[in-house]
Image: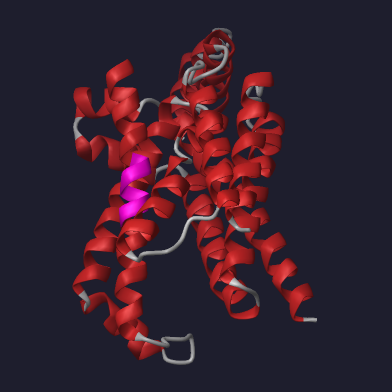
Amino acid sequence: MTSRKYLVLAGITIFSTLGDSLLARGMKDLGGASLHNIPALLLAILNPYVTVGIVLLLAFFASYMSALSWADLTYVLPATSLSYVLVAIIAHIGFHEEISNTRWLGIALIAAGVGFVAAGPSATDVRRTDAESKQNDLHDDPRGTVLQGKDLPADERCTEARS
Amino acid sequence: MNNLYAWAAIALITIAATTGDVLLAYSMKRVGDVGELFQSHGLFAVMRRILETPTFFLGVFAMAVAFYSLLFGLSWGNLSLVVPASASLTFVANAVAASVFLHERVGRRRWLAATLVAAGVALMAM
């Protein structure tokens, strides 16, 4: 579970960074595409950078959804924010952008926040969550409630269960 | 005037992105652990469970609103203002929304993490 956890978190970080970078690179090829030029935006998909970027962003969405299925939102978001740092590094190496001292300070703060939250528990109070989801299940599943109402006549139980 | 539009876009992006994140997190909690479901019932079962969750589509819709607000925001304001400001605000808004709507226990550790990341993102814009 733990290794899978960090693998998915790393996947979210890397897929979103690379996906965004490739999209940005591809859109630069197009020049000044705007909303007034819809056909150009549609043709953008044919650009190889944009295509690969979209595939990576889909992979990001899948891993993000997977993480949210077993971890808290307040855990996943800070734990994957290293992507901001990665973007800066890619911009520095790939696009030769300068990184100022303030930016380095920002990078340090983000890294501290990530380390802080990632070391903690990924889901808070499992017992309470279980109790709540059971309540929700009973609430949403008519069969569950009906099966509990033992005083109902058998016929009524069946019709309610089917509806 | 343009600045006012930029901040209006930032507010809209933050609200839409937070709504989207909270709805998606809520949906996936209802679906349950995707990894376990995948191992026991396969990919098709996972897709079906997700597609049967209406709040998932609301979440995706809110995310789309956030994305298009970002596009419009970028035409009114600077890239270096709109992107970090909305990302930074979204971190804090998400921590508040997750504790209110999802009943997540946002302890001191997570408040500090969200604040550090938000501050870091804001600094990177300078």
B109 up-or-down from A44: above or below? above
User: Between residues B93 and A105, which one lies in front from this camera angle?
Assistant: A105
Query: Can you give x and y, in whole percent of width and height, for residue B13 in the image?
Result: 63, 60
Between B103 and A139, the one nearer to me in the picture: B103
Q: Residue at point 34% right, 88% down?
A: A40
Pick the residue in front: A72 or B85.
Answer: B85
**Quadrant (top left/top right/bottom left/bottom right) for the C terminus of chain B:** bottom right
Q: Is residue A131 magenta?
A: no
Quadrant including the N terminus of chain B: bottom right
Give the image location of residue B48, x and y in percent: 31, 41
Taking the spot 39% from the left edge, 41% from the top edge, the residue there is A64
Which residue is painted at 35% across and 37% down in the image?
B49
Asked whether residue B31 appears in the rendered view, the answer is no
Residue B85 appears in view: yes
The picture quadrant where one finds residue A8 is top left
Find the magenta span and give its range: A12-18
Q: Residue at x 43, y 53 (%)?
A: A88
